[in-house]
Amino acid sequence: MTAPQSRQPLKNFWTTPRLALTFIVLALLAAFGLNSCGVSPKGTGGNTVANNPANANGAKPTVTVRQSAPAAAPAPEAMVLPANLRDMALTDIEGKSHKLSDYSGKVIIVNMWATWCGPCRQETPELVQLHKEYKSKGLEVIGLATQANDQDIELVKDFVKEQKVDYTMLYDDGSLAAPLVQMTRGRGVIPQSFLISRDGRIIGHFEGYSPVSTPPKLREAIEKALNEKQG
């Protein structure tokens, strides 16, 4: 009877290259997690824009959206905002009335967001900075909080104060958010930003937020819009 063969000691599994590869993978997963979430919190409703057109009895459409990782939204093909949308009465968080047509001749960013949305909260300081940097050149930033996603307006007011947001913050019943998403064939995600030219065309559409890729792309689009010659 032969003696059992002795087992060879296992080689160290965690070699330097494997440790480095594991670190990279975990870092990528963490980065993705910062830019993605599940569905909106309970209590904000479960319908998406596509399921909420204005109904026959005149009810306003609502907007409840999911967060997701940043994605390249298809570039709008010079979609002109209809007159009824430009002249629609919109209310900010202080109860003051606004219309998009009030900003005719300026480049506008309309940013749809929610207080509970992590990527939205990350993006806000960048929007504040862009507004300060380009306001004198003709840029207006408009925040778009929706009643469906933020039922407590006081939470919106608190966040605006906390982040020292100095641009207009609308509190929308879906009258503006829903048409913008539908016009751009957007997904049910937040944040979403719509770039509107001086002559009222949607010329840019951004879905999600990446602290690495979104700011330079948004900045480039803003500068191009500000320098665009009007026909």
Image (tube, grey):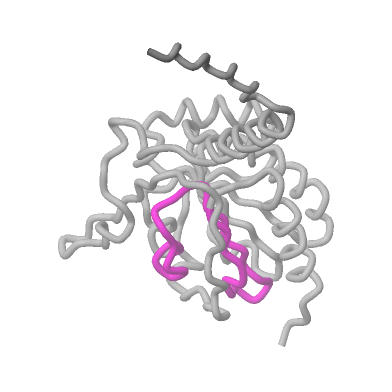
Residue 187: say if magenta. Answer: yes
Towards the viewer: 149 or 72: 72
Q: Position of residue 127 (x, y in %)?
A: 69, 45
Residue depicted at x 39% and y 66%: 182
The number of callouts visible is: 0
In the rendered view, does 90 fall on the left or right side of 100?
A: left
Give whichever of 50, 57 is nearer the camera.
Answer: 50
Q: Residue at x 45, y 11 (%)?
A: 3
Q: Is residue 124 left or right of residue 5?
A: right
Q: Quadrant of residue 119?
A: top right
- Chain part drawn in magenta: 180-207
Confirm whether the magenta stretch covers residue 223: no
The reply to whether residue 165 is in sight is: no
In the image, farthest residue toward the left: 57
Residue ranking furthest to the bottom: 231
Task: Indicate the quadrant containing the N terminus: top left, top right, bottom left or bottom right.
Answer: top left
x%, y% of residue 45?
27, 40
Q: Which part of the image, by quadrant, shows the C terminus?
A: bottom right
Residue 189 percent coordinates (x, y): 44, 50
Q: Is residue 93 above or below residue 49?
A: above
Where residue 36 appears, x then y in whole percent? 49, 40
Q: Residue 67, relative to residue 228: is it above or below?
A: above
Tell me the residue at 71%/43% (across/down): 126
Instruction: State the residue at coordinates (57%, 80%).
Output: 78
Does residue 97 show up?
yes
Give the answer, above or below, for where 128 lies relative to 8. Answer: below
**Residue 168 lies in quadrant:** top right
